[in-house]
Image (tube, rainbow, N blue to C red):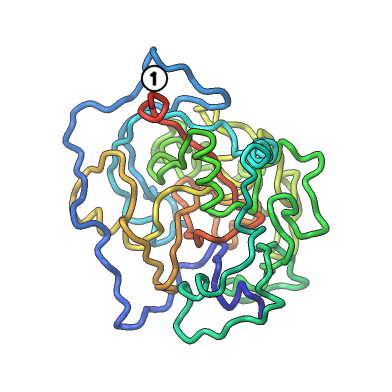
Amino acid sequence: MTLFIITFFIQNCKSDKKRTPDKEVTQKNTDAVIPKFTEKDVLVNKPDSIETPRGMVWIPGGKLKQGAVDQDKMAMEHEKPAIDVVVDGFFMDITEVTNAQFEEFIKETGYVTTAERAIDWEELKKQVPEGTEKPHDSVLQPGALTFKKAKSSVPNLYDFSQWWDWTIGADWRHPNGPNSNIDGMDNYPVVQVSYEDALAYCEWAGRRLPTEAEWELAARGGNEGTTFFWGDDSAKLPKMANTWEGEFPVTNTKEDGYERRAPVKSYPPNEYGLYDMAGNVWEWTSDWYNANYYKDVKATGAVLKNPTGAVEPFTPNNPYAQEKIIKGGSFLCSASYCASYRVSAKMGSSIDSSLEHTGFRTVATVELLNK
């Protein structure tokens, strides 16, 4: 049994069919004081005094129904009910951070990513049930999670260990394992990047990660009330995003042109000029994953301004998890499984996890640029 299975590092496109946690493990309040929106004004347009940073685009501020739209039959329970939020305008990267951009950061700082570091079992065991047996030292080596195809049909798609391997030697330079590399892939999204790694890049670049609300506002591109950023027609998917076509996780027909990651800008952008806001690789946000967050906010009747999400994480089938929300889906998302290329789709990912289908993009606010 791999380290991945033992520690539940990540759940790719995980199902909402979750076990009820033990009675003594209960969800804590999402927020004692909900920050209500009381101001009349919201920053919509880019101030004339601020220049658009290179590689970014201005996302106009406005009001948003965050969460699942009514006609989305594939929406999961943690996407419901939709909540009302107001978000100030901000700048966002046009694409995911690329290998070339991340390499520049590494060269200038000497930073060592999570996947390249020795594993600290004392820290790791805090995220698993008490009494979990320590894996053999041969497994506790630097590495990350890589995808493997199944040889035959998988009747139980809830068992994600059937297509994920803990691979020693996998990291951002070797995303599919030690024998892989990123030669000639400068314009591909960097992957095998943990939440901590993404934050380190942001600090170097003078940026930050988007909140879930900011990410959804940007992804919609002004196209409100639709399931996908381009509308509600799922038949357009192969031309609009890099996802899984065929029987998951056995056969990918590559109708969209790629089996795994695609170079950035391989598919049409949304109306704001943002690429890959559906498919290709998942993207980190700054919000804690809390399965009950939308329900808790909806119960208050509040309209939130610039919400930053739940104050603490809560994953019902793993109450020990410390997970942040990832958005956008990836090349592994299929209609038969999770369809996470929908705008409202989200998953929780452990903050120390590195996977070959997860990357990030950054944002910059007016306040951040004026510092």
Tag count in the figure?
1
Q: How dense is the environment of label 1, judged by Cα within 10 Å: few (below 14), some, or many (20 and up)?
A: some
Residue lying at 50% horizontally and 52% vertically, measured from the top left: 326
The secondary element bearing badge 1 is classed as loop
Query: Which amino acid, by three-letter code, is at mark 1?
Result: Lys
How far across and down, in percent of the image, does residue 210 sit? 44, 41
Based on the displayed image, in which of its 4 quarters is residue 190 positioned?
Answer: top right
Residue lying at 69% horizontally and 55% vertically, measured from the top left: 171
Quadrant (top left, top right, bottom left, bottom right) of the C terminus: top left
Camera-side residue of 12 and 81:
12
How far across and down, in percent of the image, does residue 94 sit? 56, 31
How far across and down, in percent of the image, does residue 226 sit? 44, 41
Residue 67 lies, with reference to residue 179, above or below; the image says above
Quadrant (top left, top right, bottom left, bottom right) of the N terminus: bottom right
Tag 1 residue: 46
Based on the displayed image, in which of its 4 quarters is residue 225 positioned?
Answer: top left
Residue furthest to the top: 48
Q: Is residue 313 left or right of residue 359?
A: left
Residue 157 lies, with reference to residue 312, above or below; the image says below
Residue lying at 35% horizontally and 56% vertically, measured from the top left: 80
Q: Is residue 218 left or right of residue 359?
A: left
